[in-house]
Structure formats: structure tokens, C-alpha cells
Image (cartoon, grey):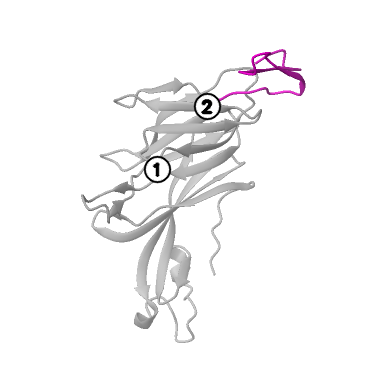
């Protein structure tokens, strides 16, 4: 149906946005992709025309060659979408394993309408997570928040997730660890306590005599 070229290594994550209105254009859907080439790409899917109009589509229903000069066209049902590269995000220093749009927020008091915040969370093997947003005056996507883990046992982040209201972000690491940050105000993201455990083989466990707790020891030289 359509092929998007640009990444030079394995694509690790994809996420679609809800329709976003920009500069009066409606029904723009955005696809964000991340790769082992350390880059993040945002693809814009603009509603182009219906097949009945025949714009950019010949009588046989095939997409004309001229449309590919502007970018590939995706035909979906009775509509077609012009796809173009909206932005290339460079900032991570290692494989980008995860990208995710901020979850939609309620736009009406009745709770029956939602809007898509223009905010993307990325997680990388460079032990950082970044939040990307378009700059208000130029619409250029920028890295506005960077959080990370400097521990020697953190070998990178395999994925990152937003909380439903977008005020917290959670990463899960190579060693099975969780890392949580919360926005306490004015984009001040502070680390929070999270469930933790061993990151190497557990060699022994024992219950307390009272039965109220259990102790474990591991090759990671930690007992919990």
C-alpha cells in the first residue's frame, strides 16, 4: 500500500497520533518511528482527497507519478493521504528502542471529545528518556526534557511510557529495573520511588520467623 524510506537500521517502535489540526489543516495524522540508527522520524499523513475526485490518481485507480514528487500517497478506503517527513529528531547517542505520543486528553466537560498533545516520549539504550515538542514560534521539534540513569547497573532503557494524564513517565531497563519521573511543576521532572529487585541470579531466599517478610540474596551482591 505504501512504503516509507529513511531509517538506515532496524525500526524498533511505531506510534500513531490522533488527528491534529495545524495551521488550519485538519485531519493530519502523525506517525512517529524510532530506529537503531539513533534517529526518530515524524511522518505527516495529510488527508489529500477522495478517490472520487481523481486528484493524483489516474483512471485505473493508480497513483500518478507526479504525486511521488511530493511524497508517497496512501489510499485508504475512499480517501488518500499525502505522506511527508515532518521532522527528523536527533539527540540520542544509542539505539532508540521506544517512542510514544502523549496520551490524548479530554477536551470537553462531557468527556466525549479528546485532543492530541504534540508531545513525544523516547527511550534509548543511552540510558536516557527525552520529551520532544514543537517550538511555539518556529514549529521546529525540540528536545525539551531529558532524564536518565547514571547507575553502572543500568545498561539502557528498553521502553518508556506516559501516565494517562501525562504528568509521569516510566522507563524499564535492560536489567529488569523500573525508573519513574514525575513533573512536579514547570517541567521540573524529579525521580520517584519505584518497585525494584535483583539484576543478577538469586541464590537463596528465606522467610522471617514471623512470616511478615522474605529475604533474598543474589550474585548482584545485594540482599533485599
Image location (x, y in percent) of residue 177: 60, 27
Q: Nearer the viewer, residue 202 or 136?
A: 202
Residue 33 is inside the magenta segment: no
Tell me where residue 185 sits by quadrant.
top left
Q: Which quarter of the image is occupied by the N terminus?
A: bottom right
> Mark 2 vs mark 1: which is more N-terminal?
1
Image location (x, y in percent) of residue 97: 58, 40
35 on left or right of 23 = right
Q: What residue range appears in magenta? A: 195-224
Residue 127 makes an appearance in the image: no
Residue at the (47%, 82%) spot, across then down: 61
Residue at label 2? 179
The overriding secondary structure of the stretch rendered in magenta is: loop
The dot on residue 102 is 1
Structural crowding at the residue carrying mark 2, measured as other residues with C-alpha within 10 Å and reported as few (<14), some (14–19) or many (≥20): many
Tell me where residue 119 sits by quadrant.
top left
Q: Nearer the viewer, residue 56 or 46?
A: 46
Residue at the (46%, 72%) spot, across then down: 75
Q: Nearer the viewer, residue 43 or 176?
A: 176
Q: Residue furthest right?
A: 203
Residue at the (49%, 47%) spot, across then down: 41
Q: Nearer the viewer, residue 96 or 3?
A: 96
User: Compared with residue 54, is residue 191 higher up or lower down, i.e. above or below?
Assistant: above
Image location (x, y in percent) of residue 212: 61, 18
28 on left or right of 58 = left
Q: Residue furthest bottom?
A: 59
User: Compared with residue 15, is residue 186 higher up or lower down, i.e. above or below?
Assistant: above
Q: Secondary structure at mark 1?
A: loop
156 on left or right of 86 = right
C-alpha gap between disc 2 and disc 1: 18 Å
Amino acid at each position: 500500500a505504501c512504503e516509507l524510506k529513511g531509517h538506515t537500521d532496524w525500526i524498533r517502535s511505531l506510534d500513531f497520533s490522533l488527528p491534529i489540526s495545524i495551521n488550519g489543516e485538519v485531519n493530519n495524522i502523525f506517525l512517529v518511528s524510532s530506529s537503531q540508527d539513533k534517529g526518530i522520524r515524524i511522518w505527516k499523513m495529510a488527508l489529500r482527497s477522495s478517490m472520487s475526485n481523481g486528484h493524483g490518481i489516474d483512471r485505473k485507480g493508480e497513483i500518478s507519478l507526479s504525486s511521488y514528487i511530493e511524497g508517497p500517497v496512501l489510499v485508504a478506503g475512499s480517501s488518500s493521504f499525502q505522506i511527508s517527513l515532518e521532522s527528523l529528531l536527533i539527540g540520542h547517542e544509542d539505539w532508540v528502542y521506544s517512542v510514544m505520543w502523549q496520551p490524548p486528553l479530554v477536551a470537553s466537560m462531557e468527556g466525549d471529545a479528546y485532543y492530541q498533545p504534540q508531545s513525544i516520549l523516547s527511550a534509548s539504550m543511552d540510558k536516557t528518556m527525552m520529551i520532544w515538542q514543537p517550538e511555539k514560534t518556529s514549529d521546529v521539534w525540540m528536545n525539551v526534557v531529558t532524564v536518565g540513569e547514571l547507575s553502572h547497573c543500568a545498561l539502557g532503557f528498553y521502553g518508556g511510557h506516559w501516565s494517562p494524564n501525562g504528568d509521569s513517565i516510566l522507563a524499564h531497563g535492560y536489567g529488569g529495573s523500573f525508573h519513574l519521573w514525575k513533573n512536579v511543576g514547570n517541567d521540573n521532572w524529579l525521580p520517584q520511588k519505584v518497585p525494584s529487585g535483583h539484576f543478577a541470579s538469586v541464590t537463596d531466599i528465606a522467610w522471617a520467623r514471623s512470616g511478615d517478610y522474605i529475604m533474598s540474596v543474589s550474585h548482584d551482591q545485594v540482599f533485599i
